[in-house]
Image: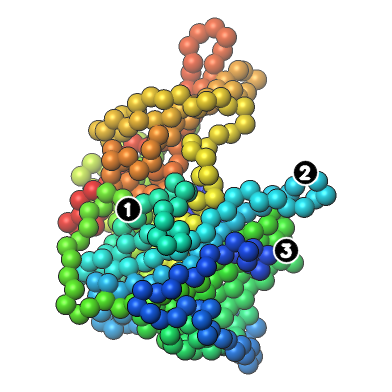
Amino acid sequence: MRKSPAPFLSRSVLLCATLALGPGCKSMEPKPTPPSDGTPSPNQGAGTVSTPDAATTDASGPETATPAQGTSPWQRARVGDRVTYAFSANRSQPGARGGTNVPSAAVAGVVTVEVVAVKAPWVWLGVSFSGDGGAPLPQLRLARSLVLPMRSDETRKLEAARKGVQSTEQLTAVGRTWEAKRYLNDQRMVDGPQESRLYAIDPGPLYLTNGLLDASTTLAGFGVAGGSQLTLTEVRQGGADASAPPPTMALPMGPGTWFDIHMDSGGTPSVMRTCMGAERGFVLRLQSAEPGEPASGAEPCPDFSQAEPVPLEEAVLSLAWEALDTQQWPPQPARTGPAMRGTQELNGHKVSVLQRETPEDVGGTRGARVVTYAADPWDASLAGLAQEARFQALSDTLFRAPQRGKREPVDGTRLVDWGTWVPGTKP
């Protein structure tokens, strides 16, 4: 099987994979939720002292994110370990008057990453988003708690490349003082974002998110403003005697799953398999294409040695950013009418779908593009399917549609199969 690395993020996020909200969007940051164990929030007595590191102007080199095998904090994980962050994201587009920006999409709340089960070598995480006081968020992508199996042993070396000007700080937050390093990567001169990441030098209980204390980015250029942000509000360690069975994989964030997309271009069929994993604080994503169909009986995801690692905290932040693209479901491009309801058989299940049709020109001939989406991306018929695939088109076909005669498919893609690969898991 020919493998090639691919980013964890979906197409809608490729241009803004690690965006975070900057000063221009402070007004929509959520109020920090007081931790349930009584520790103060970052705004309660928090303070920082920043000192640029001597002879350091660019920290683009990798930093080892985890110790050697046997000493990783992931191998000491306990049920109940958790971190909570206030998050926010928004995006604005040029306004009709005066060239000003007007809000187009926004979301804010809290996100929690918590250990819900431990069964070596797997640490099972729950990832959930909510509004103030635990209220559900209106954004469909953030409406459900997701499951993520994280491998705790070492199968490969994993490093985080942290780019930008590096400085040291001392931050008081959630009841303790942290010695930290800040990485400021300013790309505004080339219409890029300004990114800032603050990491604890000794992560301690923040091992779940690689020691992240704060992340922010401000968009710049290309007529778009906004960004997203994570700010630590709570850290809690689980009890030594806590235990729980591994959860089902009915609603996976992505790691621990695979899915196949059948592609047909000019009569040449192939299948793109996406495999997703996670290990010691990193999310792994690998894609491979094969002509025809994948070999039957083969292990769906044999290894992730060539997968590009993405820090878990960046993958979580991207979920909030992606939610801005699904304010309306299903997406409604220009020149389309109401979506038509129907049923589509996928992976042996009948899935309720919404179908949209858009007229298109196909080499000078009248044509049409027909796209289907899951009517409810969280429907039980899609159990075990990675979150990113739930919010993509289930099928997308371009037809040649002459005035006389039948429609002829020109090319297209469709979801054909999916499953979980972590031993012992059930959708």
Farthest top residue in view = 404
Residue 165 at x, y percent in the picture? 63, 80
Tags 2 and 1 touching, CB below 8 Å? no
Q: Amino acid at mark 1?
A: Pro
Local crowd at mark 1 within 10 Å, few (<14), some, or many (≥20)?
many
Residue at (40%, 34%) from the top-left corner? 375
Q: Residue at x 42, y 66 (%)?
A: 312
Q: Nearer the viewer, mark 3 or mark 1?
A: 1
Give the side of residue 350 with respect to residue 361, left or right. left
State how far apart marks 2 and 1 are (Cα).
Answer: 41 Å
According to the picture, the residue beneath numbered tag 2 turns out to be 96
Mark number, residue 228: none
Q: Earlier in the sequence, mark 2 or mark 3?
A: 2
Label 3, residues with CA under 10 Å away: few <14, some 14-19, many ≥20: few
The residue beneath circle 1 is 252
Q: Position of residue 153 (x, y in %)?
A: 27, 73
Front-most of 366 and 348? 348
The location of residue 292, given as percent across then percent down, is: 35, 36
Q: Is residue 157 visible?
A: no
Element on which disc 1 rests? loop
> Of 316 and 264, which appears nearest the observer?
316
Disc 2 residue type? Ala
Q: Which residue is mark 3?
A: 190
**Contact (Cβ within 8 Å) of mark 3 with mark 1:** no
Q: Position of residue 201 (x, y in %)?
A: 46, 86
Ranked by sequence position, the earlier of labels 3 and 1 is: 3
Residue 50 falls left or right of residue 239: right
Up/down of 15 relative to 361, above or below: below
Instruction: Report, in whole angstroms, how far the alpha carbon at label 3 lies from the one at label 1.
Output: 37 Å
